[in-house]
Image: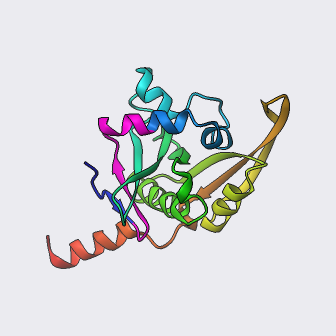
Amino acid sequence: MHYRRLAGDLCYLSPRAQEDLPLLKAWDNDLEVILPASTRGYATPATSLYTGTVDAKRFEHMFIIVDSATDQPIGWCALMGVDPINRRAHLAILIGEKSHWGKGYGREACHLLLDHGFNILGLQSVELQVFAFNKRAIRCYERLGFRTIGQRRKARILAGTAHDVVIMDFLAEEFDESRIAAVVKRTAASGS
């Protein structure tokens, strides 16, 4: 069962559940899905979850992305490596269901995850890494408000070719349209 922890129009973020593990395995084992998404190799959060090597603190902010219309899981997203002293984290996302690619689900899920990071966790910055060839993802991140802050040249070799990795970040003061802030405001106004 999935819960609407953070809800948008297209999708909602739900805490992960044991029942999600078969889908996480399927997505991790589909090269068309995982290769463009994983700049760090095959050790994705999902892989760690079902191999028993997961560091609970590192992945405690992982959510399943669920289609609002069908209540079906379509991917996952996470804030990893949360640094509470410097108030930063690393964002990772994977839309595993190819039928949902290019339809705004990833963008909305990232927005909800940023809202969680900035307005629940109190983060100051969120960083991500993306392959330079993943133009669709880069456009999505730029539309959200991420800015390119660097590039690691020839950082990953896939099929014998070295690929650049783009590093992007988003600062708390650049974030607007918080659904969490609206809930807090309504709750405070009602005196609950």
Q: Position of residue 184 (x, y in %)?
A: 29, 69
Report the span colored magenta.
8-23
* Position of residue 15 in the picture relative to residue 104 (left or right): left
> Looking at this view, is 20 or 63 the one in front?
20
Q: Position of residue 43 (x, y in %)?
A: 57, 28
Q: Horizontal and vertical percent for residue 47?
A: 49, 29
**Does residue 138 appear in the picture of this structure?**
yes
In the picture, measured across the screen, residue 98 lies left or right of residue 117, that is right
The residue at the far bottom in this view is 189
Tell me what residue is drawn at x 41 percent, y 56 percent.
116
Q: Is residue 13 above or below residue 88?
A: below
Query: With 98 as the anchor, is 150 left or right in this view?
Result: right
Residue that protrudes farthest toward the front in the picture: 99
- In the image: residue 192, left or right of residue 115: left
Along the line of sight, which residue is nearer the eye, 77 or 158? 158
Query: What colouring does the structure picture have?
Result: rainbow
Q: Is residue 150 magenta?
A: no
Q: What residue appears at the point 34 percent right and 42 percent down from the top-left corner?
A: 16
The image shows a total of numbered marks equal to 0
Query: Residue at (58%, 37%) from the top-left corner?
Result: 30
The stretch drawn in magenta includes residue 16 = yes
Up-down relation of residue 162 to residue 79 (above or below): above
Residue 55, above or below 133: above
Q: Nearer the viewer, residue 192 or 168?
A: 168
The C terminus: image quadrant: bottom left
For residue 153, say whether it is visible: no
Residue 165 picture location, percent across and down: 76, 42
